[in-house]
Amino acid sequence: MRGRLARLFRSLHNKQEGITGLETAIILIAFVIVASVFAFVVLSTGLFSAERGKETVFAGLEKARGNLEVRGALTVTDTNTDGTIDDTDEVRFNVALAAGGFPISLDPAAYTNSVVINYIDAQAREADVAYSVNWILEDGDTLLEVGELAEITVNPPTGSTLAPNEIFTLEVIPPSGGTNLINRTMPPAIDDVMDLH
């Protein structure tokens, strides 16, 4: 019996397998390296996403801050009192900056970074129509700033006549911010001065 026990212990001792401390250290280091690479990728992706989100928010704020708003009614004047509204007559409206808006150039002679106005009615669509500016509240420059008010005058394009009950649109496009669509319907009868709300 003693011999059997000795053989059993020898067989157990000979087949004993395991890992050493060095192998364990190598496996742990590999896990740490993989985990740190994964953490770096996750953090980089998160930082990139946060930066893109911040850019989107700032772009939205810039677009919102550059908006013009129409103040008051739009007035159509038959300047030659001939009973028709054509290119000799005037369409007037007041503009101001929206709350928190950035200054906007209202210089009709400027070629860049100025307001563009498009005219649309049943007969024509005229891009970048000529307009004039009459400053009501101002500080002496051509920038529309907070607290200022300007009256813009537009003439219908040549060959276009506004008839009673006709719909016309003015697109007021500032250099930054959203486009203002001023959509109005002519009254059933043409007067010398018409206040269109």
Image: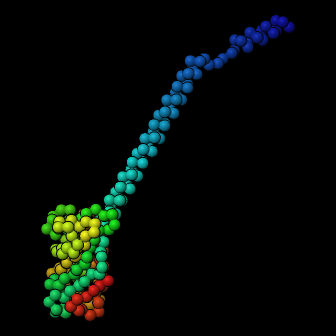
- The residue drawn where x is 49% and y is 33% is 36
| Quarter of the rendering containing residue 128 | bottom left
Residue 32 falls left or right of residue 50: right
Q: Tell me where residue 11 appears, x and y as whole percent.
A: 74, 12
Q: Quadrant of the N terminus?
A: top right
Residue 173 falls left or right of residue 39: left
Name the one closer to the observer, 145 or 68. Answer: 145
Q: Quadrant of the C terminus?
A: bottom left
Name the one closer to the observer, 30 or 39. Answer: 39
In the picture as drawn, the residue positioned furthest to the right comes out as 1
Residue 101 can be seen in this image: yes
Instruction: Look at the picture and state if 131 lies above or below 164.
Output: above
- The residue drawn where x is 19% and y is 88% is 78
In the picture as drawn, the residue positioned furthest to the top comes out as 3
Instruction: Look at the picture and state if 75 lies above or below 99.
Output: below
How many numbered badges does the structure rendering display? 0
Q: Tell me where residue 146 appears, x and y as whole percent.
A: 28, 66
Name the one closer to the observer, 154 or 22. Answer: 154
Q: How is the image coloured?
A: rainbow
Residue 172 can be seen in this image: no
- The residue drawn where x is 25% and y is 70% is 148
- The residue drawn where x is 52% and y is 29% is 32
Residue 26 falls left or right of residue 14: left
Q: Tell me where residue 133 appears, x and y as whole percent.
A: 18, 74
Instruction: Look at the picture and state if 155 lies above or below 180.
Output: below
| Quarter of the rendering containing residue 108 | bottom left
Q: Tell me where residue 144 appears, x and y as whole percent.
A: 23, 67
| Quarter of the rendering containing residue 70 | bottom left
